[in-house]
Amino acid sequence: MSQHHDSAAALLHNGQIVAFSEEERFTRIKHDGAFPAEAVKWCLTHAGITLAEVDHVAYFWQAPREVLHAGFHFLRHLPATLAVFRNDGGDYAGRAQSLRSTLAGGGAQTHSDDYHVGGALLLHLRRSMTLGRILRDAVGHTGPTKFRVHLVDHHHAHAASALHLSPWTDAAIITWDGIGSDGTSTFLGVAEGDRIRDVRRVRFPHSLGAMYACVTGWLGFHPSRDEGKIMGLAAYGRPTFVEEFRDLVRLESDGRYALDLSWFRHHATGKHQVSQKFVDRFGAPRAKTRDAVAQHYADVAYALQNTLEEAGLHVARWLAGHTGRTRLCTAGGVALNSVMNGKILLQTPFEEFFAQPASADDGSALGAAMIVSSRLGAPRHRGNAIFLGPEYPEADMEKALTEAGLTYVRQERITRTTAEAVAGGKIVGWFQGRIEAGPRALGNRSIVADPRGADTKDRLNEKVKHREPFRPFAPSCLAEHAGEYFASGYPSPVMLLVFDVLEHQRARVPAITHEDGTARVQTVAREDNPRYYEMISEFHALTGVPMVVNTSFNDNEEPIVCTPADAVRCYLRTGMDALALGPFWTEKS
């Protein structure tokens, strides 16, 4: 189980993933951090079992270690840490949320947008110690149970979620986020078969995730939610503040780094805050508004992204040299920074790269379960590690269409119908099979469009996604053609690598080419998703372009659609032109 933000549940049987899903898919609350009761219920229902048949429950948070770390941290940073007893939020603090438990049929976690301090720690400790009861209550189970609860190291869960889903047993491992249960923010390790050996840890408050979150808040966005927006905004910035931002992070020998805490207050307040020194130098925080972002703030975003990349490359280069490994597995919320990932692959000695699709806390549910499963002697998961969530029968699809009063037809070749519509300039909702894991649409809950359209990006942002105009859109490209359009053809099936679009191709695919000439690439192989591959192949045959624009099937600030009814509602309230719901096709007149 996992809980903090993006709580999730996973269920394994003899080492194989039976089910995995985020709680937000069911509650429709984006980044839902509540105890994943609905996700657990779905996992059990999907497997056809009850809680009585579960043998082990893994929770990816160790509250006793958190309490020890928090106490030490509080004393070390006195008197500044007395601020945790005041309502010392400020306009740019992280949003305060109630601290709630987490589960994932294999690993669990609890998290808010603030760091755990004071009374919240005691609440978290109590909930961790009574996890079995909380789980039984959450699913309404009143009978006997036999499961044993395992508390798993947070960053080991991150590491296992990447390593055990990768094809390798000899990789280096980096996991990085805001903070883990013992205060770890960056974990460096190495795989020894299916075991994970620690090489080094960097601990909070020295955290690249915390740094990025603090400045995200100052930029007028939500920490722990909107870091991806800042990554996109950075492309519009100039290198005005790059040199000054290097003062925020000190890169040390042996691959170490340390924040200059005089620029921040997260270590004192437990919230995502920059310090008065930061405000004095870079100005007042931007208001949380949908208004256009002034160039000054875009320049700060550029400097922030550049600083993260330099630190990430510094850490990765040291680990490659220290371990001698040429393969890298990575996870944690910072691993969702696909721009940094692309540079690590192309600018370090690592020759191969793997990040699993749910790299943030949701994926730690899988990781915790895999650690326990491996300890029990079960084999590694083999096969699909992307499409692990709910799927729905055609009867549910027809019901959703009928209840909405939509006229529809069943298409024998829905891939051809969709490709023709996209080639004709239509924006299509594409709903097929089991929902993908993680925050990126990967071809089963996608909105697809023509990458050749000069106005496609603006139409999608304004009429469909209702989001900021600076945000880019990604390509889903046939894997065998990726090298024809991008600076690297390296496989990127989960859209966590950014590469340059080749200069001579940029005018041909403007809708997926970001302001800085890059794209967050998804490569699509036939064996990974046959139906999506076929649709893109049909589009390629019609247009000569082996890709479509792919964005997640959701409106702004809502989770990716899960059910057919979710898809129909989203289709009707946005500017999509057509909907491919399984084999059924409906189109707006």
Image (cartoon, rainbow, N blue to C red):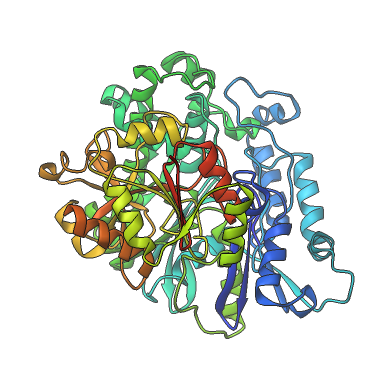
Give whichever of 400, 26 is nearer the camera: 400
Give whichever of 559, 102 is nearer the camera: 559
Question: Residue 40 lies in what quarter of the image?
Answer: bottom right
Q: Is residue 185 left or right of residue 43?
A: left
Question: Residue 236 lies in what quarter of the image?
Answer: top left
Where does the N terminus fall, quadrant-wise?
bottom right
Furthest residue toward left: 504
Location of residue 313 with respect to 188 vertically, above or below: above
Location of residue 304 with respect to 42 vertically, above or below: above
Q: Position of residue 110 (x, y in %)?
A: 68, 51
Q: Position of residue 587 (x, y in %)?
A: 44, 46
Give whichever of 542, 339 is nearer the camera: 542
Q: Is residue 182 visible?
A: no
Location of residue 4 with respect to 241 vertically, above or below: below
Location of residue 449 with respect to 217 vertically, above or below: below
Where does the C terminus fall, quadrant-wise?
top left
How many badges with numbers are in the image?
Answer: 0
What residue sits 30% from the left and 32% below the top? 235
What residue sits 64% from the left and 41% below the top? 73
Q: Is residue 252 visible?
A: yes
What residue sits 87% from the left and 77% below the top? 144
Q: Is residue 443 left or right of residue 23?
A: left
Q: Position of residue 228 (x, y in %)?
A: 44, 40
What residue sits 38% from the left and 75% below the top? 167
Q: Position of residue 261 (x, y in %)?
A: 51, 31
